[in-house]
Amino acid sequence: MSFEWLGLGALGLYLVGLFAVARIARRARRDETAADHFLAARDLGVFVLFLTLYATAYSGNSLLGYPGEAYRRGFSFIMATGFMMSIIVCFHALVPVLRPVASANGFVTPGDWIRHRFGREPGGRALLLGVAVLMTIALANFLLAQLTAMGHVSSQVTGGLVPFWLGVVGLAAVILYYETLGGMRAVAWTDAAQAILMLLGLAALLWWLLTSAGGMEAVTREIAAVRPDAVRVPDRTEQANWISTIVLLGLASVVYPQAIQRIYAARSGRALSRSLALMSFMPLATTLVVTLIGLAAIGHFGNLEGVEADMVMPRLLGSWAEAGPVSTIFAVVVFIGALAAIMSTADSVLLSLGSMLSEDLLDRPRSADSTAATGKWLAAVVLLGMVALALGPRFTLWHLIELKMELLIQCVPAFLLAARWSGLRARPAFFGLVAGTAIAIGGVWLGFERVGGIHMGVLSLLVNLCIAVAGSLAVRRGLESQQASS
Amino acid sequence: MEGGSADRAGMTRRRRARRLLLSVIGLLYVISIPWYREPGASPEIWFGFPDWVAVALACYVGVAVCNATAWWLTEVRDDDPDGAPR
């Protein structure tokens, strides 16, 4: 059987499996509440929680965007392993504070933390809206990246039998179906299966690349011959960017809405800490592997530029498939694993969008029967908009990641600082968020995305933090002087 | 009473170990970036990688081990309705 038809068959089989999981998850639901739909009734144990955290963290960006960026930048993109680890390190600042309060108060959305922490103090509602708007934009951007990646992979795995546009539209419809039907339970179960597929597939691909090239040293020597700059010690700007990227992705990823909701969805604090302990090793098993795949591609292909470089992974898989019948089967498994990873991230994003749009942005009461349904409809509308944008890919996947993080990182004071410093007040935090966002967006708009290698999002976070802290101290001093005078 | 104070001593030890591990992680991140090397220098190959990449990778393996241990030592409670920042 040819690669194209084998790919189409495997894709069909995978989709049938997804439908089956959605039906089973639907039957397993306990009630129609938002907590059951969006958080699987807060009953995710260590194993499923770990796999769903993993499948959500490693997405189309990781599988297509990271090899593409490693191909473009060379060995300095080894920083990716570091910044993916920094996410699990930064969780130390949030999880031990957020989890107990979320569990005791039945949180469902990220906004629940803002409501709880800032209560009815002046600026609390504005801060909630600001955070919800930024998170919604970041999630929509994330969804766009996943849809683009879905189109590329489905088209490649079927040798063009499924065109790019059909991959985007068709798979978006499939995600919408099983997410709407089965909620977080369906998403977590499919995530678990998808994570296993992804790990197996990536390990097989790296093994093939290294054995066919004659080992890692041969790969490095080949890169040094083809593109010497990719092997040399990076310059100071690239080193500054290395630090900046670790800070940007480490901090911003902690406030991913879908990550926060997995903190809520854990069966217990112990299950959560054990899952995060296991997650510490996953950058070595995934990010490092996809980085090496991107580096190995330098020797395989000439000069791919811009959006084209995001296709190094599918192209390598295409070459692998031609090596013989066994490798054809393995290549199809990797393709399906990649598709699974992309879809598992997209479904998590969609689920978070639904809950945030209805509860945080529109302020619909959780107890109302229509709230979860409203969330599903609104998420579907955003999905439709992103499908339209994805049909004409204009940005590299890495560029989409950076844009999303520059916005998300502005929410850090409202979560991390608020969790650790009782003096933080809502109004200064809101003004900090607005100023930080304006600087980040203005910088990107004017073409100053980085200053000396440092992301505009990181620099604007410093301004954001200064305003939040200085303003909070001023509010406290004002209150103290009021009390003293009365 | 003795059990209670033993628990508290154990918790303090875990908290200290966790802080130490987080400090080591910070140090490993600093070492992982080749700021101490001449930019543009041609590297030697160690274990199949350019030497500065091998150092970064060794640091990241260290970060993974320290971080996993720190999470293992972290007690995440389920019962704090106030969630007071600390």
Image (cartoon, grey):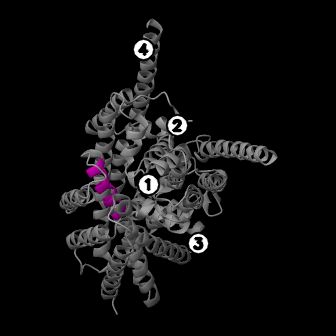
Residue A459 can be seen in this image: yes
Q: Which mark is residue A157?
A: none
How far is the residue under mark 2 from the one under mark 1?
Answer: 21 Å
Which residue is denoted by mark 3 in the rendering? A215
- Label 2 amino acid? Ala
**Magenta region's main secondary structure?**
helix
Q: Chain of mark 1?
A: A
Dot placed on the residue nearer the N-terminal end, 3 or 1? 3
Viewer-proximal residue, A314 or A107? A107
Q: Position of residue A483 (x, y in %)?
A: 45, 12
Q: Chain of mark 4?
A: A
Q: How many marks?
A: 4
- Label 4 amino acid? Gly
Q: Is residue A151 left or right of residue A486?
A: left
Q: Chain of mark 3?
A: A
* Circle 1: element type: helix
Which residue is denoted by mark 1 in the rendering? A259
Q: Position of residue B63 (x, y in %)?
A: 62, 52
Q: Chain of mark 2?
A: B
Is circle 2 on the same chain as circle 1? no
Q: Which residues are magenta?
A: A347-359
- Label 3 amino acid? Gly
Q: Nearer the viewer, mark 3 or mark 4?
A: 4
Q: Nearer the viewer, mark 4 or mark 1?
A: 4
Residue B44 versus residue A218 in the image, above or below = above
Which residue is denoted by mark 2 in the rendering? B84
Which residue is denoted by mark 4 in the rendering? A478
User: Where does the C terminus of chain A fall, quadrant-wise?
Assistant: top left
How far is the residue under mark 4 from the one under mark 2?
Answer: 23 Å
**Residue contact at pointers 4 and 2, CB within 8 angstroms:** no
